[in-house]
Amino acid sequence: MCTVRCLVAFAVKQGWSLFQLDVNNAFLHGDLDEEVYMKLPQGLSVSTSSQSTSPLVCKLQKSLYGLRQASRQWYAKLSHALCSRGYTHSLNDYSLFIKKSASSVVFLAVYVDDIILTGDDPAEINALKLFLDDQFKIKDLGLLNYFLGIEILYVSHGVLLHQKKFISDLLVEFGCSDVSPVVSPLELCVKLKSDHGDLLPNPESYRSLVGKLNFLTHTRPDLCFAVQHLSQFLKCPRVPHMDVALHILRYLRGTSDVGIFLNNAPDFSIRGYCDSDWASCPDSRRSVSGFCISLGGSLISWKSKKQSVVSLSSAEAEYRAMSKVVAELVWLVRLLADFGFCLSSSVPVFCDNLAALHIAKNPVFHERTKHIEVDCHFIRTKLADGLISLHHISTGSQLADVFTKCLTGGQHRFLLGKLDVLSPSNLRGDVGIT
């Protein structure tokens, strides 16, 4: 999904049209490279000789829905077809195909049977549509407006990615269509524990709800911290966990049309923000890492996740969070290079912990860092290579704060405005991360 957001954000900034295609019966197009047999389908009767005692089976000639190989074989067939037209897949994401010439470029992103097509060569785009229709029979859905449950709203100065329909269906499913809304996804200082409260009689409903909330985080970074918190209790959910999940639905009730705004300003500068909440888990005392990355003021990548080890200090927790955003930046810079964007200067990374910045810049900080895994120290390599530059930022201006802890309603709304997490009614004037 990060690749999809990057592609849409880049196309919007370039002023390119975004088109959507759908492949009819995609998995039936795959060719099998091995012998696969299946039982006779119900209702099919085949006469056999009286001497035959073994049951009959069907030998498949083509791929079929339900096969483990189906998705892989479909991708192989599509990839072969696109390569025959001069397209190559990106080494940074195999779902992205690119065709470049001296004067034009066309991009194709595929997710199973849904395809996004964009570029600056209308003739090649139209020719590719005809080619794919001849090969696979496709539906040309016109301009991109609904992709993988994500709705695209076009405005004069950009596009808004939101999931209003999905949220409306979710509220109906869990009987929350008429609940009173709240101003933040979690109540202040909520600390759930794995063994407090009565067990849920129907844990499947909790798992289903958390799974659908997790899907919403593709366009709702404001839910990331709450969802990662609830995801820790999927194995054995309890009543307090479900109560907090329903509280998130109350928050969604009042923010159903909110989404990520991608502006069309000709600005391709990249910025990263990272933060952590030290020892916030009451069960394991592990910290939570959070980061976000913007492209020209448009948020394209974010994450909230509990760290895998216990950090001995807040500086160490912040340093580990910094390593995560730098790792994401390394990949993003390579992906954007596939789009034709070349980095002209180092990427600023903002952290609100001075000790963590000193650890990253000082290779002789042995006493405080000798227990930290070597893979975290690649920050120093990227700093020396000039890929990133590290900067201090005040805690009140730290945009990644929303990914690491519960906030008051006022601060929550303030940070979402800075992150361009907006509703259509807010899309007036200039917006963007500053």
Image (tube, rainbow, N blue to C red):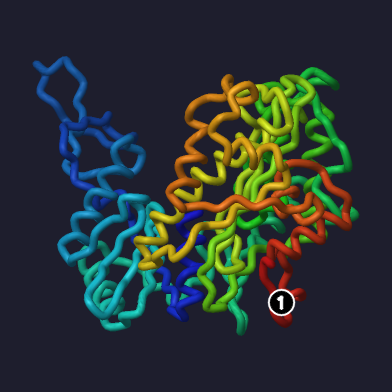
Q: Residue at x 61, y 67 (%)?
A: 297
Q: Using the rendered view, name the quadrant where residue 205 is placed.
A: top right
Asked whether residue 217 appears in the rendered view, the answer is no
Measured as percent of width and height from the top left, residue 425 is found at 76, 75
Q: Is residue 370 left or right of residue 334?
A: right
Q: Which residue is mark 1?
A: 427
The amino acid type found where label 1 is placed reads Leu
Q: Is residue 109 left or right of residue 187?
A: left
Instruction: Say which of 116 and 11 sits in front.
Output: 11
Count residues near mark 1 (Cα–Cα under 10 Å), then give few for <14, some for 14-19, many for 20+.
some
Q: Is residue 217 left or right of residue 111?
A: right
Instruction: Say which of 292 and 105 sits in front.
Output: 292
Secondary structure beneath disc 1? loop
Asked whether residue 398 appears in the rendered view, the answer is yes
**How many labels, in total?**
1
User: Outermost residue toward the front?
Assistant: 364
Q: Residue at x 23, y 63 (%)?
A: 87
Q: Quadrant of the C terminus?
A: bottom right
Measured as percent of width and height from the top left, residue 329 is found at 49, 50
Instruction: Say which of 196 and 407 sits in front.
Output: 407
Q: Residue at x 52, y 45 (%)?
A: 326
Instruction: Say which of 55 and 259 sits in front.
Output: 259
Q: Using the rendered view, name the quadrant where residue 308 is placed.
A: top right
Q: Residue at x 67, y 22 (%)?
A: 310
